Image (spheres, coloured by chain):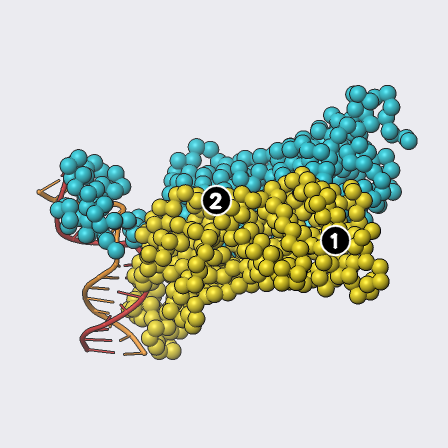
Chain colours: A yellow, B cyan, C orange, D red
DNA sequence: TTGTACGCGTTATCAC
DNA sequence: GTGATAACGCGTACAA
């Protein structure tokens, strides 16, 4: 394997000149540069990443901290990781995966002390997150995908749950729905401080109240059967229900199946809108599920590019980005009883 | 940040002794070791990974090569990556993600020349894969997840498509099915040399022929609508069909919906078995889908641990592992017309 | 515009 | 059992 020394000898220059020709930190004469280039080509030279890192004290490696299990946004997670890796590569960085159990937070300390990474992207941030606390005490640059309870001073990008829920409700209300229930995650998930659950429920309550509409929130485990049960109970308690906002894919599918079994038509009788989901999941249902899909790709890119800016000192403003889920209207949402076209015969009391 | 030098000074020994105390390459006196340990604790010393790599010429980094798009086994992919990262970490290695377009193979060359990684795991291997060719010409250790057309000399772990298909057919035949169709990926996918498509179709043909059963294979795009169309055409062409093996999740869901719409009961009239899938996807359907789930976790671990063995020279035998998908019997497969219990009234000709 | 020489923090090869 | 000290391959003042 050729080193810089080999190139220098072959080109008849000193190693430093080769180095400068490579980095461009200092001007190099045209003819010299050409000779060096020729030598590099001939030897198939590639700079040794490790030696470069040691000398420059910058590894161009970014660590992605992610909890082993609990891929809440599972569909989006792979998308996210892929986007992060691509964004990193485009800027000459590498992304190393740092799986870490939720308890073994000390691993985080090791990570930053080993100086293997120039910065850290933290995934699946919880409202109270010891990893974030630890990073905050260090000098290592980091960005969060998600938010802690108090994210003001921290670089973070997250789903705009507030706007997402608002968008979902808007979509349904505009379609003429008034009686809308929210099928959320399990209450355990909410109670444990899982950000998406907490924030969507708060938003749902707020926006429904704003509109003087009844607030119906149902927690549900992440299985199709639980979704069936939940749907059954919901329709019993609220027979006038015409729309469902969901954030629980397996339960959504179960609920839809139960709706059909009970003779309800989708979307003619009941509309279903799954938020923080993905078109891929939506494509599995029939009728095809209307979703609001999690911006996994955007968050991945944003987290990485912004971190790189911080590392390189070119960051203009702190990262405080909230991205709403994008509405992908498919076949499970349709006009409700108060739709403009059918105002004359609302289904309300039938 | 404390260095080895600081530790050496504080402990009153030389740097080399500290190094040996750390690596255990050479025996160190008990008292000396204790003093060194104390010094390290006091300073919060952690070895610098980069310096260590440069000196030892081993980075303890493994690169995971994965094509940006086309996550054929999308559900399993995240599982796979996670397992690989965990296995690596358990053995003191890091996993760096190397996204690479299918065309830009030269990136592979850069990867190995930069000497950033001690070895490479290649994901989503195609029957003819230029990345593999390139790696084969280098001295870099690598393992494949998947197989090329001629994998004999290469370390690889892959799904045992043959055994998977055999298992699927066995399951259905034992249930009393004889008229079984295979709903595969798109013909484009098969024609482009996508291993899973090619191998499953070959296996299906073989095992059905072995049993003197008719071979019905239907290619299908990866959408629910395509699945509906395919199902319709299949039932027209083969009205006696009682079971479906599928390897195409969206199409499977579409086909099931179409079955129900046409008044077929699942599994009473038609059984559905989705192979190379995952329980997570299966959980979305109702009745819950019987699947054969891709061994993403196993493959991830295997690829990494075996690669590490090769890197460290402790590999006993080459990696030639084929793991079948595990059958997860749920609610979409049931007795067919030739089931032992109902031999007296087969549905064949009704 | 180019060259010299030192430093980055370890490992590993000599000596003792 | 322990200490000097030369690599490892590159970046970067400082000199020229």
Q: Position of residue B194 (x, y in %)?
A: 65, 47
Q: Position of residue A268 (x, y in %)?
A: 80, 54
Residue A4 visible? yes
Question: What separation in Å lies between label 2 and label 1 (alpha carbons)?
Answer: 38 Å
Q: Is residue B159 above or below residue A64?
A: above
Res B235 quadrant in image: top right
* Horizontal side, residue B227 vs residue B146: left or right: right
Q: How many marks?
A: 2
Res B200 quadrant in image: top right
- Residue placed at 80% from the left, 32% from the top? B268
- Residue placed at 69% from the left, 54% from the top? A180
* Horizontal side, residue A212 vs residue A13: left or right: right
Dot 1: element: loop
**Residue A68 shows which numbered tag?**
2
**Comparing labels 2 and 1, the label whose residue is closer to the camera:** 1
- Residue placed at 79% from the left, 58% from the top? A337
Q: Disc 2 vs disc 1: Cβ atoms closer than 8 Å?
A: no
Q: Position of residue B312 (x, y in %)?
A: 38, 40
Q: Nearer the viewer, residue A259 or A50?
A: A259
Q: Bin the neighbour count of mark 2 within 10 Å (Cα to Cα): few under 14, some 14-19, many 20 and up.
A: some
Dot 2: element: loop
Q: Position of residue A15 (x, y in %)?
A: 30, 66
Task: Report the residue marked by disc 1.
Answer: A242
- Residue placed at 49% from the left, 39% from the top? B301
């Amino acid at each position: 394997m050729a080193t810089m020394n080999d190139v220098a000898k072959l080109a008849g220059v000193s190693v430093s000149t080769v180095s400068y020709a490579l980095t461009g930190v200092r001007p190099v004469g045209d003819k010299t540069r050409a000779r060096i280039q020729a030598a590099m080509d001939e030897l198939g030279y590639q700079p040794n990443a490790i030696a470069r890192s040691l000398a420059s004290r910058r590894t161009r490696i970014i660590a992605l901290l992610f909890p082993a299990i609990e891929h809440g946004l599972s569909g989006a997670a792979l998308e996210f990781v892929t986007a992060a890796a691509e964004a990193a590569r485009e800027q000459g960085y590498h992304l190393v995966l740092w799986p870490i159990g939720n308890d073994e937070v000390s691993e985080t300390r090791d990570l930053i002390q080993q100086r293997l990474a120039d910065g850290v992207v933290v995934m699946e941030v919880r409202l109270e997150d010891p990893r974030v606390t630890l990073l905050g005490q260090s000098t290592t640059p980091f960005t969060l995908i998600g938010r802690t309870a108090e994210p003001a001073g921290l670089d973070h990008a997250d789903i705009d749950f507030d706007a997402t829920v608002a968008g979902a409700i808007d979509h349904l209300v505009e379609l003429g729905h008034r009686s809308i229930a929210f099928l959320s995650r399990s209450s355990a998930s909410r109670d444990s401080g899982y950000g998406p659950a907490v924030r969507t429920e708060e938003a749902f309550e707020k926006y429904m109240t704003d509109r003087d509409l009844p607030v119906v929130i149902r927690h549900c485990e992440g299985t199709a059967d639980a979704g069936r049960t939940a749907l059954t109970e919901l329709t019993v308690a609220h027979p006038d229900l015409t729309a469902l906002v969901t954030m629980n894919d397996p339960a959504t599918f179960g609920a839809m199946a139960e709706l059909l079994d009970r003779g309800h038509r989708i979307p003619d009788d009941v509309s279903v809108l799954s938020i923080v989901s993905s078109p891929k999941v939506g494509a599995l249902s029939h009728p095809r599920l209307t979703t609001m899909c999690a911006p996994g790709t955007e968050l991945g890119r944003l987290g990485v590019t912004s971190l790189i800016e911080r590392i390189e000192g070119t960051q203009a403003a702190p990262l405080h980005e909230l991205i709403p889920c994008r509405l992908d209207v498919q076949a499970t949402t349709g006009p409700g009883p108060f739709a403009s076209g059918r105002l004359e015969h609302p289904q309300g009391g039938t």
